[in-house]
Image: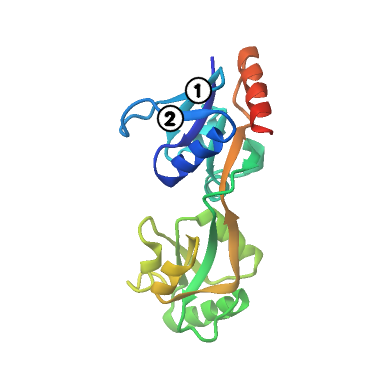
Amino acid sequence: MSVKLGVPSKGRLMEKTFEWFAARGIALSRAGSEREYAGMVQGIDGVELVLLSAGEIPRELAAGRIHLGVTGTDLVREKLAGWEQQVEELAELGFGHADLVIAVPAFWADVDCLDDLDAAAAAFRAKHGFRLRVATKYHRLVRDFLRDNGVADYQLVDSQGATEGTVKNETAEAIADITSSGDTLRANHLKILSDGLVLRSQATLFRARRAEMDAGQRAAMANLSARLGL
């Protein structure tokens, strides 16, 4: 049996992950076309590459179906309740940087911080009879963040598409979304609250705490860890 390493199956995250391992003498590659999700590992024995979507990797780690996985900090902390009991952070990989932030319409001149947002939410409910809507894909992280910062009288609405467009489309009054440069937010006339940083995320190598390993897998894991300088 091999140590199973889960890596994003496409895009820049896959390419940068391949580069990160290659710089440490381990060559990862697809086994066939882009439609195939099998991979090859050269330069070390006992390691099997599994190509998955970045969003699937936290679940596969938590279930113990893969031993190691590369995905964003944001996805692990959003998808896994009590994530520290389920996975261990082994290494930040230095790419895939993005911030999860709270943003509001730029023309809200009196709303610059979370206290202002709390006041605006109370006023909104008093005026409209329903809670101010915050569109996001990150319900767990945003709910915990707003609770810890004393923001009430809001409701989270699910956004699986272009979250930045929900305010313009009048399906939400504010958003919580991932941004790397802030350009898309500004293009949609949104501003980030001064204390609205929920999480700094980047691509990270995680280890599953519950994945079973036999003696051969433990030896392969030790060899891999030494090669990666972990």
At label 1, counting other C-alpha atoms closer than 10 Å, the crowd grade (few under 14, some 14-19, many 20 or more) is: few
At label 2, counting other C-alpha atoms closer than 10 Å, the crowd grade (few under 14, some 14-19, many 20 or more) is: some
Amino acid at circle 2: Ser
* Image color mode: rainbow
Q: Quadrant of residue 183?
A: bottom left
Residue drawn at x 66%, y 41% as measured from the top left: 84
Q: Secondary structure beneath disc 1?
A: strand
- Give residue 167's position: percent from left, percent from top: 38, 72
Residue drawn at x 60%, y 21% as measured from the top left: 212
Amino acid at circle 1: Gln
The alpha-carbon separation of the residues under discs 2 and 1 comes to: 9 Å
Placement of the N terminus among the 4 image quadrants: top right
Name the residue nearer the viewer: 227 or 167: 227
Placement of the C terminus among the 4 image quadrants: top right
Name the residue nearer the viewer: 122 or 145: 145
- Give residue 12's position: percent from left, percent from top: 43, 46
- Give residue 46's position: percent from left, percent from top: 56, 17
Residue 154 drawn above or below residue 62: below
- Using the rendered image of the protein, determine whether residue 50 is visible from the camera's viewpoint: yes
Q: Are marks 2 and 1 in contact (CB under 8 Å)?
A: yes
- Using the rendered image of the protein, determine whether residue 54 is visible from the camera's viewpoint: no
Residue at which label 2 appears: 29
**Number of numbered discs on residues:** 2
Q: Secondary structure beneath disc 2?
A: strand
Residue at which label 1 appears: 42
Residue drawn at x 57%, y 70% as measured from the top left: 152
